[in-house]
Image (cartoon, rainbow, N blue to C red):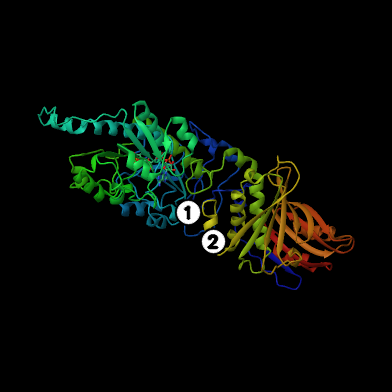
Amino acid sequence: MATTSAKSSTFVPRVSPSPSSNGSNRPSLLSFPKSSPLIPLKHLSLSRSSLHALKTLESPSISKSTTLEPTKPDSKPTILVSEKLSEVGLDVLRSFANVDCSYNLTPEDLCAKISLCDALIVRSGTKVTREVFEAAKGRLKVVGRAGVGIDNVDLQAATEFGCLVVNAPTANTIAAAEHGIALLSAMARNVAQADASMKAGEWKRNKYVGVSMVGKTLAVMGFGKVGSEVARRAKGLGMHVVAHDPYAPDDRARAIGVDLVSFDKAVSTADFISLHMPLTPTTNKIFNDETFAKVKKGVRIVNVARGGVIDEDALVRALDSGVVAQAALDVFTVEPPPKDSKLVQHENVIATPHLGASTMEAQEGVAIEIAEAVVGALNGELAATAVNAPMVPAEVLAELAPYVMLAEKLGRLAVQLVAGGSGIKSVKVVYTTARDTDDLDTRLLRAMITKGIIEPISTTFVNLVNADFTAKQKGLRISEERVSVDGSPDCPVESIQVHISNVDSKFASALSDNGEIIVEGKVKGGIPHLTCVGSFSVDVSLEGNLILCRQVDQPGMIGSVGNILGEENVNVSFMSVGRIGVRKQAIMAIGVDEEPNKETLKKIGEVEAIEEFVFLNL
Ligand SMILES: NC(=O)C1=CN([C@@H]2O[C@H](COP(=O)(O)OP(=O)(O)OC[C@H]3O[C@@H](n4cnc5c(N)ncnc54)[C@H](O)[C@@H]3O)[C@@H](O)[C@H]2O)C=CC1
Ligand SMILES: O=C(O)C(=O)COP(=O)(O)O
């Protein structure tokens, strides 16, 4: 933290841990609290590591939280697996962590256990509520959803607690689509009812006459991964397929020979409707009395998505009245549904206990996908399947690595120049770049500047997951501006400036003419450099700690300060002087490996020509 200051003020050192205090000089996008015992990625043998490029970018970092369970620095993290996960995934997890497979936990059991866990892996049966995040007391860093739907995870709470949520969005697509087709055919041909009847010793050929699928219209509601695979298969069965999805691209539909239509057109023209949209506030009970009033009488409905997209009472009414001839349901609003559920018991309903993803192949794929994502995230890596953090391709992350580091350091530096450190309301970040807007994703940079600004002045730890939320919560408005320059687009950013307005500075020279604190940095040779403070140009690499002094430019200054530091065995790593004119005011930037003690800094302050100085922890 900054210690300073104008020549007459008393010097009071305040030191707080810096993100670099783990000994690493690398930024940590997914920094987690101190209790996180982490193992280098090289100790892992993952079968499919798409994450290697991130390794260069992040390192676990340290938070200031003191409420966390103390964990031995070299002990393994603990991963709680609360629902059945395939052994291949468990093997990946066990090579890295202590794995606690505790199935069938009550919500209370889960809350009781969670504060001892670094990660939690769930399927659809575990509700990861706000209470779970609260009970975790900051230790839970990652929730892995071994499947697609994350409607059982309170994403808002996860984000507020800086907990990354990752899912496994692709490995069970085909399984779900195949189950959809299985239910469609079984429903059309009364397979389940006929089977039950035979097992009861009956032989009722006339009762179980079905309907044909060929030539019929199927409406696929939700034309994403599963929906489009269902459509493809239904085309193979000779069905006419339409789809409704407000966000699906036309070309995906064209490629499969499907017409994208409005909701009303889809439901009113279909002989069969298959549901494949996620459960969200918008889709909640989207199939209700009003919808059933629009359907073709005798329509047949398949739901392999989520029970909540159907108003189940309305569906019972529609089945009773014959508006809906049959329904095939894999998912229910409450799972398992009550034993006396009118829906499950209805003679025109066939039901399966949420089996869409349950094939051997899908479960193995999902388990590996989620295990790798969770392990990577515990290593501070950004998972490609992150649900509540920006998904940034590995190559972009690798390219931005030094800029991410620069961003965090500029944030830390700027905030330490603010008198009192707090009361910051408005920060402007200016990126000078030769890149087109579409070609420069600044979310990481903004998050790291936010981290740099907030961490030194609060007990909150900030990572990519909660940076925007934390800034908002603290009333900190971060705006961004781009300045286009001619130059090589090979370099993502020429310079980054951090402006803090409406604050006093403990180092007056950091204030620009319009009263803003301004620091500017660039990446040179892969190393972040400070290139401007207020109106003064400097050029120092942002490593270790920094002393900024304002003085009247004159011979011997570097020597005087260098001698004071040398006498106290403080190693100077670099020095740079920026001045407004010969023998006029100048800023001397001195990089030091060690933190000088109070006395040493006092001596620097007493050097005749020095008008003000500040010590900054980078
Ligand atoms: N029963 C089971 O075991 C399984 C169920 N699922 C569920 O299937 C659903 C779809 O999964 P994926 O295809 O992998 O997801 P996806 O994200 O690839 O596709 C979902 C599609 O729904 C669309 N959508 C969103 N709001 C919509 C709306 N109001 N109306 C129509 N479409 C809308 C989206 O644009 C997207 O294209 C999810 O709810 C998932 O949880 C997935 C796998 C297994
Ligand atoms: O992936 C999904 O969304 C599913 O619904 C699968 O759920 P499950 O993992 O089988 O509980």
Residue 332 lies in quadrant: top left
Of the numbered discs 2 and 1, the one sitting upstream in the chain is: 1
| Res 472 label | 2
Residue 565 is situated, as x and y percent measured from the top left of the image, at 77, 58
Q: Is residue 66 above or below residue 8?
A: above
Image quarter for ligand 2 equals: top left
Residue lying at the far left in this picture: please name it.
Answer: 201
Q: In the drawing, does residue 173 fall left or right of residue 49? A: left
Q: Is residue 237 above or below residue 601?
A: above
Observer-nearest residue: 390 or 25? 390
Q: Amino acid at mark 2?
A: Lys
Residue 456 lies in quadrant: bottom right
Q: Decide if residue 81 is in sight here.
A: no
Residue 316 is situated, as x and y percent measured from the top left of the image, at 22, 47
- Residue at position x 62%, y 46% from top? 26
Residue 41 is situated, as x and y percent measured from the top left of the image, at 53, 38
Observer-nearest residue: 576 or 602? 576
**Circles 2 and 1: CB atoms closer than 8 Å:** no
| Res 557 label | none
| Res 159 label | 1
